[in-house]
Image: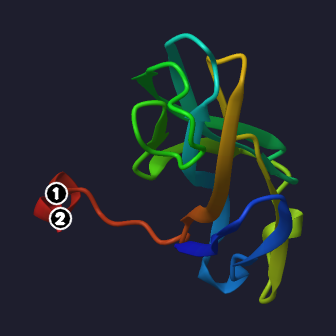
Amino acid sequence: IASSDSIPVTTTNWNQNVTLNQFDPSLGTLTQIVFTYNGEVTANIRVESEDAAPATVTATSSAFFLFGGPINANLNIAQGQSIDLTAFDGTVDFGGTSGHTFAPINASDNGVFILNAGFAPFIGLGTFDISVQAIGTSGATGAGNLTTQIATVAGAGVTVTYHYDTGTSVPEPATLALL
């Protein structure tokens, strides 16, 4: 049985909770809990090299995600793109030969955390929360005189999957043949 919740993509530097369902003990005995967590980041980045010489500029879409208990893990997600720009063309317009507007730069990652004991907080008919924090760390580098414009958004999700024993057994084929 699984329960999922997510935080939609929104401007970074947020701290929110995902809410997940507890395991209903009337279904059987809990044997394992698997948490799958993920994050995604997208940055829109514009650059203008104001250097007197050509430069290679690298733009990076990145965010740091922190997942609270019981996961207590983080994801550091990043994806970069580079462009060769000429010496400053005299106009800060993020275009021409010394400027560039990158297509949205997307990145994502996920992780898994498994519990084989300590199930009590996750058993019941209610819900529990896991805190998630996303800190945007996007940027651009490469020219000593660089004007940038960056907008970073991120979203995250958590799924909990309960593995359990129902207490009922299914006869093996050999046992059925004897009957």
Residue placed at 57% from the left, 63% from the top? Answer: 161
Q: Quadrant of the C terminus?
A: bottom left
**CB within 8 Å, label 2 to label 1:** yes
Residue type for callout 1: Pro
In this view, 62 is above or below 23: above
Query: For mark 1, does the 10 Å Cα neighbourhood hold few (<14), some (14 to 19), or many (20 or more) residues?
Result: few
In the figure, is residue 88 to the left or right of 179?
right
- Residue at point 54%, 49% (across, down): 93
Q: Which residue, as the protein is rendered here, is positioned at the far front?
A: 90
In the picture, measured across the screen, residue 122 lies left or right of residue 50, that is: right
Residue at horizontal 40 percent and vertical 50 percent from the top: 103
Residue 129 screen position, x and y as percent = 84, 72
Residue at 51 percent across and 34 percent down: it is 79
Q: Which residue is mark 1?
A: 173
Name, please, the residue furthest toward the bottom: 125
View extreme (left): residue? 177
Q: Is residue 91 above or below residue 57?
A: below
Q: Which residue is mark 2?
A: 176
State the separation of the CA atoms marked 2 and 1. 5 Å
**Residue 38, how many percent across, how many down?**
59, 52
Element marked by disc 1: helix
Which image quadrant is residue 47 in?
Answer: top right
Please state which amino acid type lies under the numbered disc 2.
Leu
- Say whether residue 98 is left or right of residue 179: right
